[in-house]
Amino acid sequence: MLSLGIHYYPLTLPFLLILLVGLVALTCLAVLRVLQFAYSQLGIAPKYFFTWLFLSLAGSYVNLPIMRFSPEEMTRLVEIPFYGVPYVIPTVETWPGTILAVNVGGAIIPVLLSLVLIVKNRLWRNAACSPSRSRAWASPSRFSTRP
Protein backbone atom coordinates (compact mmCIF):
# COMPACT_ATOMS: atom_id res chain seq x y z
CA MET A 1 0.00 0.00 0.00
CA LEU A 2 1.30 3.44 -0.93
CA SER A 3 1.64 5.89 1.97
CA LEU A 4 1.33 9.56 1.16
CA GLY A 5 2.85 10.64 4.47
CA ILE A 6 -0.38 12.24 5.65
CA HIS A 7 -1.43 11.29 9.16
CA TYR A 8 -4.87 12.22 10.35
CA TYR A 9 -5.45 11.87 14.05
CA PRO A 10 -8.77 13.61 14.80
CA LEU A 11 -8.26 13.92 18.55
CA THR A 12 -4.59 14.91 18.65
CA LEU A 13 -4.97 18.66 18.14
CA PRO A 14 -7.63 19.22 20.84
CA PHE A 15 -5.64 17.17 23.34
CA LEU A 16 -2.42 19.01 22.52
CA LEU A 17 -4.18 22.38 22.90
CA ILE A 18 -5.63 21.34 26.29
CA LEU A 19 -2.17 20.18 27.38
CA LEU A 20 -0.58 23.41 26.18
CA VAL A 21 -3.16 25.59 27.97
CA GLY A 22 -2.69 23.55 31.16
CA LEU A 23 1.10 23.87 31.00
CA VAL A 24 0.91 27.62 30.40
CA ALA A 25 -1.52 28.05 33.31
CA LEU A 26 0.65 26.00 35.69
CA THR A 27 3.76 27.86 34.60
CA CYS A 28 2.09 31.23 35.13
CA LEU A 29 0.90 30.23 38.59
CA ALA A 30 4.33 28.92 39.57
CA VAL A 31 6.17 31.94 38.21
CA LEU A 32 3.78 34.42 39.82
CA ARG A 33 4.05 32.68 43.20
CA VAL A 34 7.83 32.62 42.96
CA LEU A 35 7.97 36.25 41.84
CA GLN A 36 5.53 37.30 44.55
CA PHE A 37 7.69 35.54 47.13
CA ALA A 38 10.81 37.26 45.78
CA TYR A 39 9.13 40.65 45.86
CA SER A 40 7.88 40.07 49.41
CA GLN A 41 11.44 39.15 50.47
CA LEU A 42 12.61 42.47 48.99
CA GLY A 43 10.07 44.30 51.10
CA ILE A 44 7.45 45.15 48.48
CA ALA A 45 3.84 44.76 49.61
CA PRO A 46 1.83 42.11 47.74
CA LYS A 47 -0.71 44.72 46.64
CA TYR A 48 2.04 46.51 44.66
CA PHE A 49 3.47 43.31 43.19
CA PHE A 50 1.25 43.29 40.10
CA THR A 51 1.76 47.02 39.60
CA TRP A 52 5.54 46.66 39.37
CA LEU A 53 5.18 43.50 37.26
CA PHE A 54 2.76 45.16 34.85
CA LEU A 55 4.92 48.29 34.58
CA SER A 56 7.98 46.19 33.86
CA LEU A 57 6.25 44.02 31.26
CA ALA A 58 4.44 46.91 29.56
CA GLY A 59 7.57 49.05 29.65
CA SER A 60 9.59 46.39 27.86
CA TYR A 61 7.89 47.47 24.62
CA VAL A 62 8.97 51.10 25.03
CA ASN A 63 12.46 52.29 24.07
CA LEU A 64 13.49 55.87 24.73
CA PRO A 65 16.03 57.11 22.18
CA ILE A 66 19.05 58.84 23.69
CA MET A 67 21.39 59.41 20.80
CA ARG A 68 21.51 58.85 17.05
CA PHE A 69 24.74 57.98 15.30
CA SER A 70 25.07 59.27 11.75
CA PRO A 71 25.01 56.90 8.78
CA GLU A 72 28.34 55.77 7.37
CA GLU A 73 29.55 54.53 4.02
CA MET A 74 30.93 51.02 4.23
CA THR A 75 32.91 49.08 1.64
CA ARG A 76 31.81 45.51 1.15
CA LEU A 77 33.44 42.91 -1.05
CA VAL A 78 31.06 41.02 -3.34
CA GLU A 79 32.09 37.90 -5.24
CA ILE A 80 30.59 37.78 -8.73
CA PRO A 81 31.22 34.78 -11.00
CA PHE A 82 31.84 35.63 -14.67
CA TYR A 83 32.19 32.64 -17.01
CA GLY A 84 33.02 30.44 -14.04
CA VAL A 85 35.75 32.73 -12.68
CA PRO A 86 34.91 34.47 -9.37
CA TYR A 87 35.79 38.14 -9.27
CA VAL A 88 35.84 40.19 -6.06
CA ILE A 89 34.31 43.62 -6.57
CA PRO A 90 34.17 46.23 -3.82
CA THR A 91 30.82 47.95 -3.44
CA VAL A 92 30.05 51.03 -1.39
CA GLU A 93 26.94 50.83 0.75
CA THR A 94 25.41 53.39 3.04
CA TRP A 95 25.08 51.88 6.50
CA PRO A 96 21.97 53.24 8.22
CA GLY A 97 22.38 55.29 11.34
CA THR A 98 22.28 53.58 14.72
CA ILE A 99 19.96 54.68 17.51
CA LEU A 100 21.08 54.29 21.11
CA ALA A 101 18.00 53.73 23.27
CA VAL A 102 17.08 52.82 26.85
CA ASN A 103 14.39 50.23 27.49
CA VAL A 104 11.80 51.41 30.03
CA GLY A 105 10.92 47.97 31.39
CA GLY A 106 14.48 46.71 31.50
CA ALA A 107 16.36 49.78 32.73
CA ILE A 108 14.21 52.60 34.07
CA ILE A 109 11.65 50.58 36.06
CA PRO A 110 14.33 48.45 37.83
CA VAL A 111 16.34 51.60 38.68
CA LEU A 112 13.20 53.23 40.11
CA LEU A 113 12.45 50.07 42.08
CA SER A 114 16.02 50.05 43.44
CA LEU A 115 15.76 53.71 44.44
CA VAL A 116 12.42 53.08 46.17
CA LEU A 117 13.92 50.18 48.12
CA ILE A 118 17.03 52.18 49.04
CA VAL A 119 14.91 55.03 50.39
CA LYS A 120 12.36 52.74 52.08
CA ASN A 121 14.97 50.60 53.85
CA ARG A 122 17.27 53.57 54.57
CA LEU A 123 20.21 52.07 52.73
CA TRP A 124 21.49 55.24 51.08
CA ARG A 125 24.73 55.25 53.09
CA ASN A 126 25.49 51.66 52.19
CA ALA A 127 24.50 52.24 48.57
CA ALA A 128 26.73 55.31 48.33
CA CYS A 129 29.71 53.61 50.01
CA SER A 130 29.55 50.27 48.17
CA PRO A 131 31.74 51.30 45.17
CA SER A 132 34.55 52.46 47.48
CA ARG A 133 34.24 49.31 49.60
CA SER A 134 34.45 47.02 46.60
CA ARG A 135 37.53 48.89 45.38
CA ALA A 136 39.16 48.56 48.80
CA TRP A 137 38.54 44.81 48.83
CA ALA A 138 39.73 44.37 45.24
CA SER A 139 43.06 46.17 45.68
CA PRO A 140 44.76 43.67 48.07
CA SER A 141 43.57 40.69 46.06
CA ARG A 142 45.06 42.17 42.93
CA PHE A 143 48.56 42.05 44.44
CA SER A 144 48.21 38.58 45.93
CA THR A 145 47.19 36.82 42.71
CA ARG A 146 49.64 35.44 40.23
CA PRO A 147 49.18 35.29 36.46
Image (cartoon, rainbow, N blue to C red):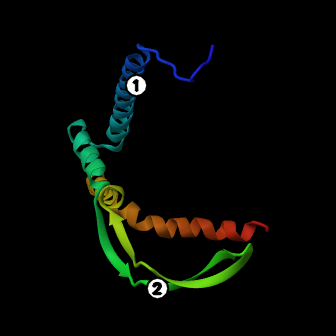
- The residue at the point 64 percent across, 83 percent down is 89
- The residue at the point 66 percent across, 75 percent down is 79
x and y percentages locating residue 3 in the rendered image:
60, 19
Q: Secondary structure at mark 1?
A: helix
Residue assigned mark 1: 20
Q: Nearer the viewer, residue 16 or 37?
A: 16
x and y percentages locating residue 109 in the rendered image:
29, 56
Please state which amino acid type lies under the numbered disc 1: Leu
- Numbered label tally: 2
Please state which amino acid type lies under the numbered disc 2: Glu
Mark found first going from the N terminus, 1 or 2: 1
| Image vertical order of residue 55 relative to residue 40, above or below | below
Looking at the rendered image, the quarter that the C terminus falls into is bottom right
Q: Nearer the viewer, residue 41 or 30?
A: 30
Residue assigned mark 2: 72
**C-alpha separation, residue under disc 1 versus residue under disc 2:** 47 Å
Residue 21, quarter of the rendered image: top left
Q: Residues within 10 Å of mark 2 (few under 14, many from 20)?
A: few
